[in-house]
Amino acid sequence: MSGPPSKYEGLRADRIIATLEQLRDRISERFPDSGLSKVCAEVIETGRWSARDAARLARPNWLWRLVLFAMLAAGLAAQIYAAQLIHLTGFGASAPELVQGLEAAVNLLILFGGAIWFLLTLEERFKRRRVLDGLHRLRSLAHVVDMHQLTKDPTILLGPYVQTKSSWQKPMSRFELSRYLDYSAEMLALIGKLAALYGDRMRDSVVIDAVNDVENLTAGLGRKIWQKLTIISALEEPAA
């Protein structure tokens, strides 16, 4: 049963960016001048670029399609002209010459078919490469976010410890550590949603697989963070 499109059927880039901006403000207010807030600002800039890029790639390139149509029409006209020449000269030629002419015509037809396929898929392959470049940027940012939370070990909250020269300069409380990890997990989830914008705009199977890879990456990194949050939650229960 078909009906009018729902406003919840697709992702809205402006909502994702607004959520990222709010997350940046929350991080800056809780952890002023922290590296995580700067990473979030970088994610916002990349997200704006990704949103524009995904919207641009979703639109058809009419200029290229017009040029493609003209090239195909010229190639088809050349094929018809070559077929007429074979038809006009074929009756006066010997059998070997006629076979050679037919073989050349078949080879030309095969090459023309290959050229048609190449030109018809050129726009799609160009867009696919642009999408893969954009997804690579998002994948790199996901790893940067993971690096910022990598050293946040919740087991350090179990008791007093001897601080060394390479230890954290400012140890976090349980609440601060849980907030920091929660912000990191939320940022990873939003990076996955930025990647999903490409899959939402394009139906290419290669693009969808690449988008799924980024989403699986962010989900896997997020699970590691939630394991740390589970440890913090388990530490807070006896205290409560």
Image (cartoon, rainbow, N blue to C red):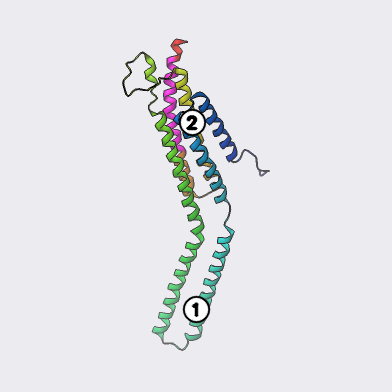
Residue extending furthest right? 4
Residue at figure coordinates x 39%, y 29% from the top left? 150
Q: Amino acid at mark 2?
A: Ser
Q: Is-magenta flag for residue 216?
A: yes
Q: In terms of secondary structure, where does tag 2 sit? A: helix
Q: Residue 119 versus residue 183: which sits nearer the camera?
A: 183
Classify residue 96 by image quadrant. bottom left
Q: Is residue 86 above or below residue 233?
A: below
Above or below, 141 against 69 in this view is above
Residue at the (37%, 19%) spot, across then down: 155
Q: Nearest the camera: 32 or 216?
A: 32
228 drawn magenta: yes
Q: Position of residue 79 (x, y in %)?
A: 51, 75
Q: Which residue is mark 1?
A: 82
Residue 56, given in percent of the width and then of the height, sits at: 56, 50
Which amino acid, by three-letter code, is at mark 1?
Ala
Rendered-image quadrant of the N terminus: top right
Residue positioned 54% across, 29% down in the render? 25
Identify residue for label 2.
37
- Toward the bottom, the furthest residue is 92
Q: Residue at x 53, y 27 (%)?
A: 26
Task: Determine the CA span between mark 2 and mark 1.
Answer: 66 Å
Q: Is residue 168 above or below residue 111?
A: above
Q: Position of residue 193 (x, y in %)?
A: 52, 38
Q: Is residue 123 left or right of residue 14?
A: left
Q: Secondary structure at mark 1?
A: helix
Question: Badge 2: how crowded within 10 Å, few (<14), some, or many (20+)?
Answer: many
Q: Residues within 10 Å of mark 1 (few under 14, many from 20)?
A: some
Main SS class of the magenta portion in the image: helix
Task: Tell me where the magenta segment starts and ends, as one range.
Answer: 215-235
Q: Indicate which disc residue 188 carries.
A: none
The answer to whether residue 126 is visible is: yes
